[in-house]
Image: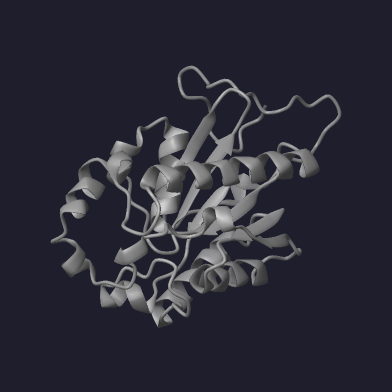
Amino acid sequence: MILVRHGRTTANTAGVLAGRTRGVRLDDTGVQQAARTAERLAVVPLTAVVTSPLERCRQTARAIVKAQDGTPSTATERGITECDYGAWQGRSLRELAKEPLWKVVQTQPSAAAFPDGESMVAMQARSVTAVRRLDARLEAEHGAGAVWVAVSHGDIIKSVLADALGMHLDLFQRLHVDPASVSIVRYTETRPYVLATNTHAGDLSWLRPPVKKRGRKAPAQDAAVGGGAGPGSAA
């Protein structure tokens, strides 16, 4: 699973917590960021591109699909939509930083619940449930080598990465996810593997599913003791 955050938006540059506000679109820089990420992903034959229903994510997802040689399936998934920030939505970050809840969000997210919105625990639970469900379905349909993209939001991606890393939600602010960045998680029966976080450049051709050969064994799900030989090495 490739996690892509949407490109930079007008709200990002204005210092406003957009949340689920409608009509928040990529700015010119965000459009360019999405195009660069799409070009980077073009070397990987994607099985599916799944996106948050919010416009900024759908714009980013369209750029990714357009850059593909093939035609990956596309879908909208409410489970990976932005956190419901409730009464915080639409307010400036500078103003919100003065609220007592701000410190809780920074230091103990598991205790944070946004007024008239959702808790951060609920946010993580529904986003992790959604991506694990989607990953299992796409693997069942296309095989273990299937690669797919989820286009989502900063806090959503951070919460999914924290789960995959086995981190308590209270530690998830140690992670950083930039606009249009790429993070990669591989789910297996034994554990998730976090292969990359918050990347902006680099060759991703190693994510191409291997050519199936008679008698070829499936990729090992155990961790390679000593670190292994890296991507692209013979099985």
Spot occupied by residue 25 in the image (x, y as percentages of width and height): 46, 78
Q: Which corner quadrant of the image does residue 129 belong to?
A: top right
Left or right, 27 with reference to 135: left
Q: Which corner quadrant of the image does residue 188 belong to?
A: top right
Spot occupied by residue 201 in the image (x, y as percentages of width and height): 44, 58
Q: How many marks?
A: 0
Residue 52 visible within the image: yes
Is residue 174 depicted above or below 117 in this figure? above
Quarter of the rendering occupied by the C terminus: top right
Q: Residue at x 53, y 22 (%)?
A: 223
Residue 196 visible within the image: no
Left or right, 16 with reference to 213: left
Spot occupied by residue 11 in the image (x, y as percentages of width and height): 34, 75
Q: Residue at x 54, y 69 (%)?
A: 60
Q: Which residue is drawn at 52% across and 69% down?
A: 54
Spot occupied by residue 159 in the image (x, y as percentages of width and height): 42, 45
Q: How is the image coloured?
A: one colour
Extreme-right residue of the structure: 214
Left or right, 132 with reference to 199: right
Extreme-front residue of the structure: 116
Q: Which of 164 and 37 lies nearest the eye of the viewer?
A: 164
Q: Which of 183 and 211 lies nearest the eye of the viewer?
A: 183
Left or right, 229 with reference to 30: right
Q: Which residue is drawn at 73% across and 27% down?
A: 218
Extreme-top residue of the structure: 225
